[in-house]
Amino acid sequence: MNKFEALGFSNAIVKAVTELGFENPTPIQEKVIPVLLEGNTDLVALAQTGTGKTAAFGLPLTHLVDFTSRDTQAVIICPTRELCMQITRDLQSYTKYIDGANIVAIYGGASIDNQSRDIKRGAQIVVATPGRLCDMIDRRRVNFSNVRFAVLDEADEMLNMGFKEDLDTILSETPEEKNTWLFSATMPDEVLRISKNYMEKPVEITAGTKNSGNENIEHIYYVVQARDKYAALKRIADSNPDIFAIVFCRTRIETQEIADALIKDGYGADSLHGDLSQQQRDHVMKRYRARSLQMLVATDVAARGIDVNDVTHVINYNLPDEIENYTHRSGRTARAGKTGVSICIINMKEVGKIRIIERIIKKKFTQGTIPTGFEACEKQLFSLVKKIHNVEVNESAIESYLPKIYDELKDLTREDIIKRFVSTEFNRFLDYYKNAPDLNANASRDRERSTPGITKLFINLGELDQLDRNTLKEYISEVSGVDLNMITNVEVKSSFSFIEVKSEAAEIIQGTFKNARYNNRNVRIESRGGSGGGGKSRGGYEGGGNRRSFGGGERRGGGNSYGGGDRRSFGGNRGGGYGEKKSYEKKSYSDRSDRGERKDFGGDKKKSYSSSESSSSYSGGGDRKSNFSREKRPRKKMD
């Protein structure tokens, strides 16, 4: 007998889940389902992403709802449209054999009129994102007077995204005597408060340890120089030929840049971020689920709700701004009892952050070594040989071509044929990795010191000036007149940047920038070994010198994000910019283009730092442009 039948589900539900391949409940399902089936209880359930939470609340919900009625009896609230659509698909599959069942998804980016019509036809269960649902409440398009069940899925993430007011609005529209079920991967203070405000003596169930990570995930970090991050990402991908990964970046701009670079370098990649239309997002996810893409490059917000099986790697190109988000990121792999790898690409100054994450998720990280060029080639070679060995031969289709093939290859030995056939696919890797450097941090520093003909310069412009690597490089070339090829590397920080140039161009650049101004302030370019360089500043920034030496002002902060510390910056009078904060992204002024308003430290002006417009090749869709809007947008309307 199917174990779901033993739990007490109807024959229609058991038949549906059996077709889906459900045989044994997961640990969270075993604990939650019997409690919910008893009815009339509030619940707080803690479990990691990918452990079967949707079925844990979805199956009891489909069992308890009266599908002979057209009233809306349950509302499920989740943070993103992807998760909203995924939950809706799952519930529709559970109710496949239940007559009259109507589950409707409500989310931004789709026609609100069509969604309203779907509800009017009699939606017993509504699955919604907070922003769109509040909009429909304002327009009186929904009636929650008969709601018996309210489910908050990924509650920690909704609160982290600033949806508390929306949740208050939605829940105030429902009857007080309803049951509220809260599901979350972590239990920060905000989730504890919501359980006290909206629930009465809730049953608390935990699968695993609070705030801990999935037991089946291996956590690895690689320490590289900032300039080598992208090369390290490619080396990791090349060393795992069967990689099927999600690469997390902090900002929309960086997400687009990394995806564009990977596409240009021949990898199957695409981006997922908040500037894409719903149609574009659906197209990208369709390609990713079909495994037409090796790597999906995404922001934290855009990746919420991605439910894709067999993701082999999660790669943190940047550590998350909120430490709790590491749990959500890593939970994209090792789903449904499978194993996976979570990788962090960090610099030396971020090792301390790894230790903090270890303490929170109660998992030990392994420091890995970036594979050498030879090792990457070896992995690719044997992957190719394995594919050749296992390829299925269509004898009837190829038979008519074989005589000409044999004739063409008659002067080659068996060994020659093997070598040449493998080389047709393998030569590009050999060429790329010929004399490939060691990317590990210590080797990178040695290489940097020994690189002849390269001078490292400091400039007091950075992300706060709405510049990225490409625009800063173009600006320097335009002002100095040196060719773009003379600028070998650009490393953009928040308020300053490092530029590596060929030594013959260094004096020209420094000379032409003596009286340069950018946005009505003086621009300074100095050699790394000059007054602006020479070792590490108090804040630990390599090459920074005294970090208060540029512009006379100071910017204090650091707060408690990853341990924080006192931070002081270059440029202008920027006092009071950071203040006392709890986390990197949520409270500090690192790039927050995914989550709304950002503040410029020069005076009282407010700006958005998402300044550039980039485009990438978009398979099957023509040119796709990512418009990085400069307009202020409230965080809570991100769905």
Image (cartoon, grey):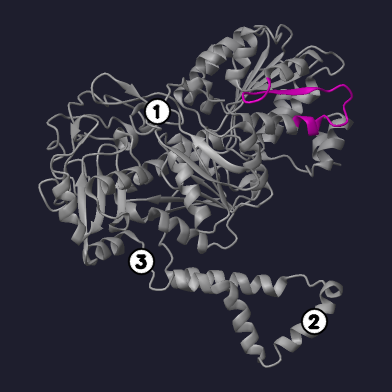
| Residue in the picture at 13% in, 43% down | 514
| Residue 450 x %, y % | 22, 67
Mark nearest the camera among 3 and 2 is: 2
| Upstream in sequence: badge 2 or badge 1 | 2
Ranked by sequence position, the earlier of labels 1 and 3 is 3
Mark 2: secondary structure: helix
Can you identify the residue that label 1 sits on?
Answer: 586
Cα separation, mark 2 vs mark 1, equals 64 Å
In the rendered image of this protein, does residue 431 appear above or below residue 175?
Answer: below
- Magenta region: 91-111
Q: Mark 2 points at which residue?
A: 402
**Residue located 55% across and 44% down the image:** 214
Quarter of the figure with residue 15: top right
How far is the residue under mark 3 from the one under mark 2? 45 Å
Evaluate whether residue 537 shows in this view.
no
Residue situated furthest left in the rendering? 531
Question: What's the magenta bit mostly, secondary-structure-wise?
Answer: loop
x and y, in percent, of residue 515 in the image: 13, 39
Q: Which amino acid does label 3 sit on?
A: Asp
Q: Does dot 1 land on a helix, a strand or a loop? A: helix
In the picture, measured across the screen, residue 6 lies left or right of residue 555, that is right
Q: How crowded is mark 2: few (under 14 residues within 10 Å), some or many (20 or more)?
A: few
Q: Mark 2 against mark 1, which lies toward the viewer?
A: 2
Image position, residue 110 (x, y; %): 66, 25
Give amino acid for label 1.
Lys
Q: What residue type is labelled 2?
A: Leu
Residue corresponding to mark 3: 438
Q: Is residue 120 left or right of residue 503?
A: right
Lateral position of residue 516 relative to residue 32, left or right: left
